[in-house]
Amino acid sequence: MNSLFDFIVEPYGNRYNNEVKVGDKSLIINTKIESYKSVNNIGKVIATPLAYKTSIKTGDLVMIHHNVFRRFYDIRGNEKNSRAYFKDNLYFVQLDQIYLYKNKNKWQSFGDRCFINPIKNNDNTNASLEQSLIGILKYGNSSLEALGIHEGDLVGYKPFGEFDFLVDNQRLYCMKSNDIVIKYERQGNEKEYNPSWAW
């Protein structure tokens, strides 16, 4: 079973991540299906598209758009699956809905996507805990490397292009390569900002 243009994936775990472990107890953090922040973003690849050759293989994990597994209520109040739903807990995923893939226990960016690790704010005059529009490149890609921007570099990025994801219990910003606008020299005092709610 293969699709011509789409990957076929199943959720890796549940469709929603509504619980966190606190000690030996489970805490329910969401009871609504509308909240995109609680939708599982990780799928397992069941089949790859016939029309493309990619580095993603059957069995790999993929970090995908939050609307793939999401459910919603229609105008009559009936609960519905997303338009990506195929059958039997399987979903179609388009190329531009995949941001990371994992094989051999390492996440790698896909296409023109990259991931930025936010850093702590060192400015005592600013109440924000996180430095605005500056971060450390966690997962780069070949187009950024061609520009001399590598993983671990301190970069600046455009506003409103970043979307936060939890990757291995670390909050990262996903964006496109052209959202990166500058590479800074590291001062050595930059610290990653990973709030406690992310673990």
Image (cartoon, rainbow, N blue to C red):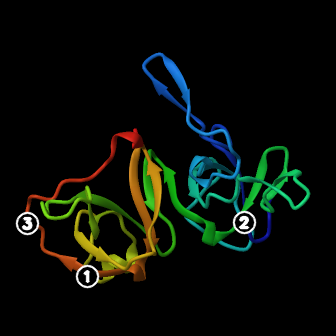
Quadrant the C terminus occupies: top left
Q: Are marks 1 and 2 in contact (CB under 8 Å)?
A: no
- Label annotation for residue 182: 1
In the image, residue 35 sits, relative to residue 111, either above or below, namely: above
- Label annotation for residue 71: none
| Residue at (62, 47) in percent of width and height | 59
Kindly report which numbered mark, 1 or 2, lies closer to the viewer in this rendering.
1
Q: Are marks 3 and 2 in contact (CB under 8 Å)?
A: no
| Other residues around mark 1 within 10 Å, as few (<14) / some (14–19) / many (≥20) | few
Residue 124 spot, x, y in % from top left = 12, 60
Residue 158 spot, x, y in % from top left = 37, 80
Residue at mark 3: 187
Residue at mark 2: 49
For mark 1, give the secondary structure: strand
Task: Please name the amino acid that badge 3 sits on.
Answer: Gln
Q: Earlier in the sequence, mark 3 or mark 2?
A: 2
Q: Are marks 3 and 1 in contact (CB under 8 Å)?
A: no
Horizontal arrangement in the rendering, residue 81 relative to residue 10 (left or right): right
For mark 3, give the secondary structure: loop
Front position in the image: 86 or 135:
135
| Other residues around mark 2 within 10 Å, as few (<14) / some (14–19) / many (≥20) | some
Kindly report which numbered mark, 3 or 2, lies closer to the viewer in this rendering.
3
| Residue at (61, 56) in percent of width and height | 57
* Quadrant of res 4: bottom right
Residue 128 spot, x, y in % from top left = 26, 59
In the image, residue 21 sits, relative to residue 92, either above or below, namely: above
| Residue at (48, 75) in percent of width and height | 112
Mark 3 to mark 2: distance in Å?
A: 45 Å
Q: Earlier in the sequence, mark 1 or mark 2?
A: 2
